[in-house]
Amino acid sequence: MAHGKALREVVAAPGTTPLIGVFDMLSASVAARHYDGLFVSGFGFAASHYGLPDIGFIAWPDVVGFVQRLRLALPRQHLLVDIDDGYVDPEVACQVVRALEQVGASGVILEDQRRPRRCGHVEGKRVLPLEQYLEKLDLVLGARSDLVVVARTDATDEAEMLRRATAFAATDADAVLVDGLPSVEVLRRLRRAVPDKPLVFNQIAGGRSPKLSLAELAELGVDVTIYSTPCLFAAHAAMEEAVVDLKRRDGVLPDGPIGVAESQALLEHNISRHHDLPAPRAHSPSLTR
């Protein structure tokens, strides 16, 4: 299956395509019951796989292995993967792209940060010289076959954001992402500066960018929005509440909506021989694009 082609078709359709950030197989299994598109967030992967902040600890074979497991369990979902700066070296970036395409990724996001890198919504980001990033991007574009490639800038100065986005739009990248956009007005200026290339917008709780609905984003001309952390932050809060409550109850388990049967019903659907069976009913209304 041409996963890149399938994602391109969705991006080209009217409206804004949501991609939900997932950090492990369980979060992906839950998100896939409600959404057709998933985002392998570097923020979430660093937290779940290493227990470390999103500042450059990720090793690319770990990401490839995770995406391989995702594709085996979820053959129909769009999978967009954050590959940070391509793990520094352009040759490594190309190898990662080839490996991810082989295991079934739909697309990747390649950023222009220099090391030590930072989450796109925190202070202290520094970017590579534009020409150096464009050389890496060109190599990555030459290495892919069908994979969608999103060119991302982490520039913080508005004029530099627009300069880089315009340069990215002139390449064969499939879409442009300016991370940490500070306002709707800057987003409007970005859309005017890049009229003919799909735009990706990143929403993260507590981040720099405004909170916008899919309808608002569509009106602003955004083609894809990625939600990096709703599953991660919800799990963080729920686990904290669960262990505090267990401690308060002197170890007596409370009754809750999820037990052994519900958990197993969710996960059994990920076994390949069960893929064509009806999915188990979700605990909340289905939300698709």
Image (cartoon, rainbow, N blue to C red):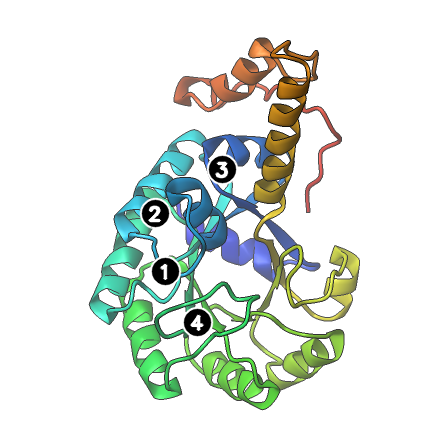
Q: Which mark is residue 63?
A: 2
Q: Nearer the viewer, mark 2 or mark 1?
A: 1
Using the numbered discs, state the Cα–Cα distance from disc 3 to disc 1 in whole angstroms.
Answer: 30 Å
Q: Position of residue 148 (x, y in %)?
A: 43, 60
Of labels 1 and 4, earlier in sequence is: 1
**Percent position of residue 216, x then y:** 78, 63
Q: From the top left corner, tell me how far across and down residue 39 is, in percent.
A: 51, 49
Residue at mark 1: 56
Query: Which residue is denoted by mark 4 in the rendering?
Result: 173
Q: Identify whether 35 is placed above or below 225.
A: above
Q: Mark 3 = which residue?
A: 76
- Is the residue marked by circle 2 packed among few (<14), some (14-19), or many (20+) residues within 10 Å? many
> Counting residues from the N terminus, which is met first, the one under dot 3 or under dot 1?
1
N-terminal-most mark, 2 or 3: 2
Q: Secondary structure at mark 2?
A: helix
Nearer the camera: disc 3 or disc 1: 1
In primary-sequence order, the first of circles 4 and 2 is: 2
Nearer the observer: mark 2 or 3; the answer is: 2
